[in-house]
Image: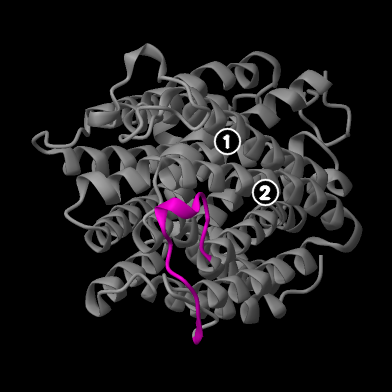
Amino acid sequence: MKHIDPLAPSGKASRSAIVGWLLFDWACQPFFTLVTTFVFAPYFASALAPDAVSGQSLWGYATAAAGFVLAFLSPVLGSIADATGPKKPWIAACGLVLFVASLALWYAAPGEPHAIAIALMAFAFGTVAVEVAAVFNNAMIPHLVPPERYGRLSGTGWAMGYCGGLVSLVIVLGFLAADAGSGKTVLGFAPLFGLDPATREGDRITGPFSAVWFLIFVLPLFLFTPDIPRSAMGLKEAARQGVLQIRKTVADARRHESVGRFLLANMVYQDALVALFAFGGIYGAGVFGWQAVELGVFGILLTVTGTLGALIGGRLDDRFGAKPVILGAILVLALVCLGVLSLGREHILFVVSTAPPVPADGIYGSASERMFVLLGLVIGSVAGPLQASSRSLLARLVPAREAGRYFGLLALSGKVTSFLAPLAVAVATAIFQTQAAGPAVLILFLLAGFWLLSGVKRV
């Protein structure tokens, strides 16, 4: 009797199976939103590191280290998963690492011995785990829907992720993280569970919160989304084949001009995007002195535009193709970085003088702050389409049965030099002793990615 793949790309995957897959992005996003960008990272720069410039550099080195590890792990594990079949056991293993690493962030308290080391190591391990898990989740796309629906599925997944980030951010800032001065949250409440603002427990709780959130919301994937059938190959043989497949996959990508050029472009522009998100909150805290309220509202606004952008981008992808969506997003991000570079505490557009931020002026009281918020909203609106269309483009270019190894290679292309942009930002920041060095470096990465992707045949 002929075996029928329960996830064959026939468009008949059940609604519950697709919802379970979509909730993976929802489950992971609080780690990116709360830890990587808007709450824990600024807390690290402002409360743990000696100063904001050192904090940006140290965070950059940790991001670079995680990217270096991912460069080796992602393609090998993706090929192993292709050989063995099922993807969910790998997601579970990565999820366990993410859970433990996120819990560890609680212990990175101000004044505690080794707090900086704990924060950086837990962040790096958590980043590696969540990114590797995404490789296996992405590899399921071709088995859920037919090619003409890749863009919508991928875009909806990113939108779900942004919604998860938004909800988690509102919960943390509205009920858990309080301002050290007032002792109140953004919504004016005393923090739940007696969290102490003086020791920044509201900021540190983002780690355990992200861990529990992931555990709860990743369950539908395991309960309702069928996995790829297991092959007869054992793990040891699969590991050997996985390593050998890397060479073959790279060789195949090089022979397939569109795949190879796309992966190279993805390597460059994803570097910039990783750094842009890693340093967004840190930049606001360091340049404008933003505290929990300003950072929180900024994060909420950016997440709202990110959700809308991902939903709209997925439909534009299906209608016009992934390549135009990606090119447009890259160009917009480059212009945004130029705009950020033009800002300072007392000027906009490089030479237009403005009044500096004053606490009595209220939230985003200065023209520079308002301009930075506007640019941040633009980043949110195009980042989702950029990432969603990147994975839908690859899903269209490669055979469904080999999606794991190619998505591993996508992760490799996105991570093999993902340490380079954060490292370049960290080094430039340390050398020039200004946070403005960050966006200047990222513009070069984005323009290089735009040029490389321009040569990919339209798909």
The range drawn in magenta is: 351-366
Going 17% across and 43% down the picture, which residue do you hit?
A: 117
Answer whether residue 140 is visible to the viewer in this image.
yes
- Residue kind at label 2, given as amino acid type: Gly
166, above or below 338, in the image: above
Quadrant hosting residue 183: top left
- Residue kind at label 1, given as amino acid type: Gly
Residue 273 screen position, x and y as percent: 53, 61
Going 88% across and 33% down the picture, which residue do you hit?
A: 11
Residue 196 magenta-highlighted: no
411 displayed left or right of 357:
right
Residue 352 screen position, x and y as percent: 53, 84
Give the residue at mark 2: 306
Q: Give the camera-side residue of 387 and 205.
A: 205
Q: Give the camera-side residue of 82 and 196.
A: 196
Residue 364 magenta-highlighted: yes
Residue 256 screen position, x and y as percent: 68, 70
Give the residue at mark 1: 165
Q: Quadrant of the C terminus?
A: bottom right
Residue 105 screen position, x and y as percent: 29, 32
Answer whether residue 241 is visible to the viewer in this image.
no
Find out whether the residues at labels 2 and 1 contact each other: C-beta distance under 8 Å.
yes
